[in-house]
């Protein structure tokens, strides 16, 4: 298997409303932007409805929703990456690093063809530099078992992009995302705009994008509040 180098896409802020322009070639990932809801993909995590705001508390849980805060009241508010008003995958990280966060098989791949595998991820819980030192997710992307690239969600409430390419070695590709972070405190994330295509997407600002809504102080406040309340919840259980 030939694994090529990882390169970082542009970073989009929580409410900045960045989106990808249409690729020349079709995205082979079904429901890669999650606008169809909880369909077209699989996960080893357990699904729960995107509301109310207590549904996201169990670890190894996920939803497809418009706002992490609506699913888990200790998460930060965050708009989706695609349009700023759509849906995204939201996960409460599992302590089992072999659990597949997201996976999908794609047929009709051309052997020897170069494909791009791209996605955006965000930390929806905690500031890794904050006083509680909460862990952040480390999401790795695989094609037919080969590691394509890894993105650590270091920035609270900010979309971070990953783009890597892969030479097809089979007519079918099994894509998956794993999280190598096993910590229970923190380790919460969102994923959006998963793309697998022969053409890379290009990220450009949306006209009239909203200003940044979460300052550093607000982010730290959310992180501290989440850390304190999560400890309280566990002490009761």
Image (tube, rainbow, N blue to C red):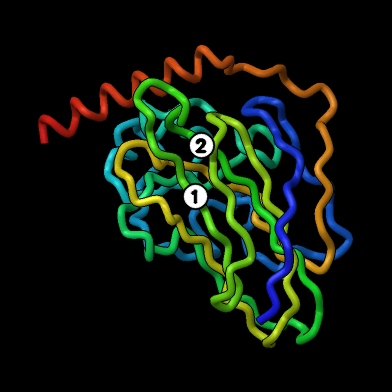
Query: From this viewpoint, which residue is outermost toward the top?
Result: 217
58 or 182, nearer to the observer: 182
Q: Nearer the viewer, residue 154 or 62?
A: 154
For the point 74% across and 53% down, which residue is it?
A: 7
**How many numbered marks, from 0 up?**
2
Q: Where does residue 63 sit, x and y in percent of width and height?
A: 43, 47
Q: Which residue is mark 2?
A: 123
Residue 65 located left or right of residue 187 = right
Looking at the image, is 69 positioned above or below residue 80? above
Q: Calculate the distance from the C-alpha at mark 2 to the C-alpha at mark 1.
A: 10 Å
Q: Which residue is mark 1?
A: 138
Q: Residue furthest right?
A: 24
Compared with residue 122, is residue 171 higher up or lower down, i.e. above or below?
below
Which comes before the other along the chain, label 2 or label 1? Answer: 2
Element marked by disc 1:
strand
**Quarter holding residue 188:** top left
Quadrant assignment, res 136: top left
Q: Please state the horizontal and vertical placement of residue 67, each as a whole percent of the image.
A: 50, 33
Q: Could you say which is closer to the camera, residue 150 or residue 178?
A: 150
Quarter of the rendering occupied by the C terminus: top left
Q: Residue at x 52, y 53 (%)?
A: 139
> Are discs 2 and 1 less than 8 Å apart at CB?
no
Q: Residues within 10 Å of mark 1 (few under 14, many from 20)?
A: many
Q: Can you tell which quarter of the image residue 29 is in? A: bottom right
Which residue is nearer to you in this view: 145 or 103? 145
For the N terminus, give its image quadrant: bottom right
């Amino acid at each position: 298997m030939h694994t090529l180098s990882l390169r970082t896409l542009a970073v989009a802020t929580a409410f900045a409303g960045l989106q990808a322009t249409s690729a020349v070639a079709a995205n082979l990932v079904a429901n890669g932007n999650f606008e169809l809801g909880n369909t077209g993909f699989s996960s080893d995590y357990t699904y729960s409805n995107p509301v109310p705001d207590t549904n996201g508390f169990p670890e190894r849980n996920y939803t497809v929703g418009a706002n992490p805060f609506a699913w888990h009241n200790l998460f930060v508010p965050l708009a989706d990456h695609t349009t700023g008003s759509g849906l995204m995958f939201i996960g409460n990280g599992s302590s089992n690093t072999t659990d597949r966060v997201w996976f999908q098989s794609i047929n009709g791949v051309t052997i020897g063809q170069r494909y791009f595998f791209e996605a955006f991820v965000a930390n929806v819980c905690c500031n890794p530099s904050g006083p509680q030192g909460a862990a952040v997710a480390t999401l790795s992307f695989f094609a037919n078992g080969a590691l394509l690239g890894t993105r650590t969600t270091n920035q609270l409430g900010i979309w971070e992009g990953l783009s890597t390419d892969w030479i097809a070695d089979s007519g079918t590709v099994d894509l998956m995302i794993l999280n190598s972070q096993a910590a229970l405190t923190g380790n919460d994330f969102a994923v959006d705009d998963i793309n697998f295509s022969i053409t890379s997407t290009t990220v450009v600002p949306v006209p009239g994008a909203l200003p940044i809504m979460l300052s550093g102080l607000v982010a730290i406040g959310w992180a501290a509040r989440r850390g304190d309340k999560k400890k309280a919840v566990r002490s009761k259980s």
